[in-house]
Amino acid sequence: MDNCVFCRIISGDIPSLRVYEDEECIAALDINPASPGHALIIPKVHKKDLTELDVPEIAHYFAAARLIGERQMEKLGADGFNVVQNNGPAAGQTVLHFHIHVIPRYAGGPQIAAWKQTEPDPGFLREIAERLTSEA
Ligand code: AMP
Ligand code: ZN
């Protein structure tokens, strides 16, 4: 897709710092990293988000994410890593071409992703569980 920044990275129209490549995907450094080494797993095919992927694709891309996370620890001295994957603008997805963030974390480094924990009443939690498991 001509107007997709990640398709243009894949085709080479837009430069990127590739740190991994195989037949199905690349990993490239994020242009605005949350921490040193923040990489994106980007499929070579254009699919908008996780809902459009089949299970073998999901397995392949997340295996690539694991590999990059392991390299961040081994070669950059990261102490851990976050795997973050946004689906839809409401979830913070800004590039509508599926991708996985692999964000190295360094002990004592800044907090990166956090949500405010809530304390709903048990009835509300049960209602949500029923809705998620109902056949209708
Ligand atoms: P998301 O908010 O999950 O859609 O993440 C999109 C990510 O793509 C952001 O972290 C951007 O910094 C990153 N990004 C956008 N354009 C480029 C680019 N040309 N090269 C590398 N990363 C990019
Ligand atoms: Zn694309």
Image (spheres, rainbow, N blue to C red):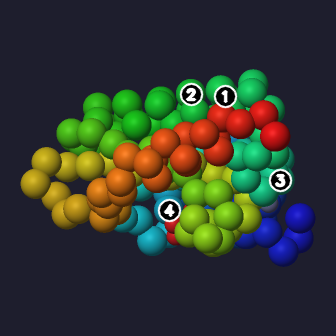
Query: Residue 55, percent across and down?
Result: 74, 27
Q: Is residue 41 left or right of residue 67?
A: right
Please, which residue is most extreme toward the left here?
Answer: 108
Of residues 74 and 105, the one drawn nearer to the viewer in this rendering? 105
**Alpha carbon separation for disc pair 1 and 4:** 20 Å
Query: Residue 122, percent across and down?
Result: 38, 46
**Is label 3 within 8 A of ligand 2 (CB to nearest ligand atom)?**
yes
Quadrant of picture, ligand 1? bottom right
Q: Amino acid at mark 4?
A: Asp
Q: Nearer the viewer, mark 1 or mark 4?
A: 1
Q: Earlier in the sequence, mark 3 or mark 2?
A: 3
Q: Quadrant of residue 75?
A: top left
Residue tagged 3: 46
Q: Amino acid at mark 2?
A: Ala
For residue 63, the mark is 2
For residue 30, the mark is 4
Q: Earlier in the sequence, mark 4 or mark 3?
A: 4
**Alpha carbon separation for disc pair 4 and 3:** 18 Å
Q: Are marks 3 and 2 in contact (CB under 8 Å)?
A: no
Residue located 45% across and 71% down the image: 32
Residue located 47% across and 31% down the image: 66
Q: Earlier in the sequence, mark 4 or mark 2?
A: 4
Residue located 16% across and 58% down the image: 109
Q: Is residue 107 left or right of residue 55?
A: left
Image: 31 above or below 77: below
**Alpha carbon separation for disc pair 3 and 1:** 15 Å
Of residues 12 and 71, the one drawn nearer to the viewer in this rendering? 71
Local secondary structure at mark 4 = loop
For residue 60, the mark is 1
Q: Residues within 10 Å of mark 4 (few under 14, many from 20)?
A: many
Q: Are marks 1 and 2 in contact (CB under 8 Å)?
A: yes
